[in-house]
């Protein structure tokens, strides 16, 4: 069997496939959008035909997964490469099969409205801690554009072509990040602090210690929460220390900006589902007009 890659006109190699019936409403794009690091992410692509492609370095090696819903009901997963079988096995979890959205209770009218709008949103898990950690560290204390530029440069430079989708790249495995030369970090725009954090963390078995990431040098509560939300599907992970999220939560729930402490207080009624509330706001709440200066985008390559 053959298929076309995301945006490619050339057919890909043979693949294996799986059909899965979700246990309830599922918005595939909303659920998987959490893993795309900007529109130019070489490891996650939204294809024109509606399929979503992810290149992943799995425990069995590189693999590519394409997810679609050709009949509007069942999810079709197609996978390439040595990691293909692992990706198909893990696909339901990635799409939130372990999530419990039915337990969620909205305590504000606006959240009830967002929950209805985002009825198919699931908090899935990739079971790839390192992939989420490396990207999250690159996003520490910088704009999204700056972080995504670094991610795009390093993954394109050091990731191998994705099986079945050669225009994509598989994020490099943990050991490769330790071997990236210092001048390449500079070329990516990542300053020494983020480089040191990633290189240091690459020396630990993070895949089995997602609940202990905060013990690593340079990994604070914000980074740990960002990783947990993606890698283990933690619907309660709160990224404390984010530049935008407290204001978004405050603006949505009480119509005014709040700090981290105020955000945590507002989210108390949603214990167990606090990240779900944050994600609903991010995806479905219109953003208010800015009243504060934009966070500046820096370019360390010119320093």
Image (tube, rainbow, N blue to C red):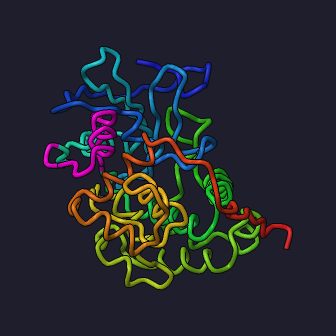
Q: Quadrant of residue 131?
A: bottom left
Q: Position of residue 223 (x, y in %)?
A: 45, 70
Q: Is residue 40 left or right of residue 71?
A: right
**Nearest the camera: 226 or 79?**
226
Q: Residue furthest top?
A: 71
Q: Position of residue 260 (x, y in %)?
A: 43, 72
**Nearest the camera: 158 or 44?**
44
Residue located at (40% from left, 63% from top): 227
- Quadrant (top left/top right/bottom left/bottom right) for the C terminus: bottom right
Residue 86 visible somewhere in the drawing: no
Q: Decide: is 49 above or below 89.
A: above
Q: Position of residue 209 (x, y in %)?
A: 30, 73
- Quadrant (top left/top right/bottom left/bottom right) for the N terminus: top left
Q: Decide: is 67 above or below 148.
A: above
Residue located at (42% from left, 32% from top): 66
Residue stretch in magenta? 102-124
Residue located at (64% from left, 58% from top): 291
Q: How many marks?
A: 0
Q: Does the segment drawn in magenta span residue 69?
A: no
């Amino acid at each position: 069997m053959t298929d076309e890659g995301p945006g490619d006109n050339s057919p890909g190699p043979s693949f294996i496939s799986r059909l899965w019936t979700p246990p309830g409403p599922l918005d595939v794009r909303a659920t998987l959008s959490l893993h795309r690091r900007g529109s130019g992410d070489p490891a996650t692509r939204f294809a024109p035909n509606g399929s979503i492609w992810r290149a992943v370095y799995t425990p069995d090696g590189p693999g590519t997964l394409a997810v679609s819903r050709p009949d509007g009901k069942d999810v079709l997963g197609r996978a390439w490469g040595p990691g293909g079988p692992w990706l198909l096995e893990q696909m339901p979890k990635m799409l939130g099969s372990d999530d419990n959205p039915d337990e969620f209770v909205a305590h504000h009218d606006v959240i009830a409205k967002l929950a209805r709008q985002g009825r198919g949103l699931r908090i899935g898990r990739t079971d790839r801690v390192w992939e989420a950690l490396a990207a999250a560290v690159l996003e520490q204390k910088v704009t999204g554009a700056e972080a995504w530029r670094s991610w795009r440069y390093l993954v394109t430079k050091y990731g191998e072509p994705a099986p079945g989708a050669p225009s994509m790249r598989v994020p490099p495995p943990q050991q490769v990040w330790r071997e990236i030369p210092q001048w390449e970090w500079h070329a990516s725009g990542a300053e020494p602090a983020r480089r040191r954090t990633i290189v240091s963390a690459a020396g630990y078995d993070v895949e089995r210690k997602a609940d202990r990431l905060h013990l690593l040098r340079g990994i604070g509560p914000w980074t740990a929460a960002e990783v947990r939300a993606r890698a283990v599907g933690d619907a309660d992970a709160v990224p404390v220390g984010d530049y935008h999220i407290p204001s978004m939560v405050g603006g949505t729930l009480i119509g005014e900006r709040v700090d981290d402490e105020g955000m945590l207080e507002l989210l108390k009624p949603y214990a167990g589902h606090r990240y779900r509330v944050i994600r609903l706001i991010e995806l479905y709440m219109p953003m208010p007009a800015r009243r504060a200066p934009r966070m500046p985008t820096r370019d360390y390559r010119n320093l």
